Image (tube, rainbow, N blue to C red):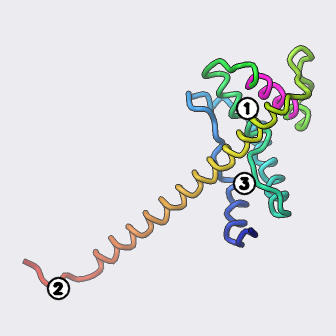
């Protein structure tokens, strides 16, 4: 189903304004600035691909940020550790941040782990779209309430008791 122009514009604006989804626990403010910038640029790449028909999803850097904060909050099992190291390795290489140390670099993961990675990417994308829609709804609600209050203040009372 083709997207409407409004939806495409919303996605483009969301590229720059959507929140970075992090694991709850208070570690979101420790994300490196280069990773935040990389997330925006990868979101832009994903929007371009989505405009050509690909299914929109979260990016590798978004997954890296989410799993980074998750790992600081609680221990991860083997599969999620491998997924995190795989995505971190790809992210470091893609953004020329150097090489991951050979003892922790992961160049491939199992098909099960790829499925979990794709599921997380989809979830991250939907979470940020949901946050954008809630923010938009709250803004429209606040605008309506402000207009109603202004109208009420401007309209003279017909009867005063």
Disc on the earlier residue, 1 or 3: 3
Residue 34: image quadrant is top right
Determine whether 42 is above or below 53 in the image: above
Residue marked by disc 3: 15
Q: Position of residue 158 (x, y in %)?
A: 17, 85
Judge whether residue 69 is colored magenta.
no
Q: Which residues are magenta?
A: 80-90
Q: Residue furthest top?
A: 103
The residues bearing labels 1 and 2 have C-alpha atoms spaced at a distance of 60 Å
Mark in front: 2 vs 3: 3
Q: Which mark is residue 86?
A: none
Residue marked by disc 2: 158
Position of 161 with respect to 121 (left or right) is left
The structure residue drawn at horizontal position 88% and vertical position 37%, both measured from the top left corner, is 95
Which quadrant: the N terminus?
Answer: bottom right
Disc on the earlier residue, 1 or 2: 1
The structure residue drawn at horizontal position 71% and vertical position 46%, both measured from the top left corner, is 122
The residues bearing labels 1 and 3 have C-alpha atoms spaced at a distance of 18 Å
**Tag 1–tag 3 contact (CB < 8 Å):** no
Circle 3: element type: helix
**Tag 2–tag 3 contact (CB < 8 Å):** no
Residue marked by disc 1: 32
Determine whether 75 is above or below 34 in the image: above
The residues bearing labels 2 and 3 have C-alpha atoms spaced at a distance of 50 Å
The structure residue drawn at horizontal position 85% and vertical position 34%, both measured from the top left corner, is 91
Q: Position of residue 77 (x, y in %)?
A: 70, 19
Disc on the earlier residue, 2 or 3: 3
Q: Nearer the viewer, residue 104 or 121?
A: 121
Which quadrant: the C terminus?
Answer: bottom left
Position of 150 with respect to 111 (left or right) is left
**Within 10 Å of the Cα at label 2, are there few (<14), some (14-19), or many (20+) other Cα atoms?**
few
């Amino acid at each position: 189903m083709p997207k409407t122009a409004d939806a495409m514009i919303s996605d483009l604006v969301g590229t720059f304004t959507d929140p970075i989804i992090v694991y709850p626990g208070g570690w979101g403010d420790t994300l490196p600035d280069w990773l935040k910038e990389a997330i925006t640029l990868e979101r832009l790449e994903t929007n371009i691909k989505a405009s050509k028909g690909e299914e929109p999803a979260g990016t590798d850097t978004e997954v890296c940020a989410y799993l980074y904060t998750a790992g600081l909050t609680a221990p991860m099992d083997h599969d999620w550790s491998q997924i995190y190291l795989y995505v971190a390795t790809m992210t470091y290489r893609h953004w020329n941040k150097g090489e991951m140390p050979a003892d922790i670099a992961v160049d491939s993961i199992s098909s099960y782990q790829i499925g979990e990675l794709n599921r997380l990417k989809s979830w991250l994308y939907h979470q940020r779209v949901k946050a954008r829609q809630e923010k938009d709804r709250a803004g429209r609600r606040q605008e309506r309430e402000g207009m109603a209050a202004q109208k009420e203040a401007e309209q003279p009372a017909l009867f005063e008791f």
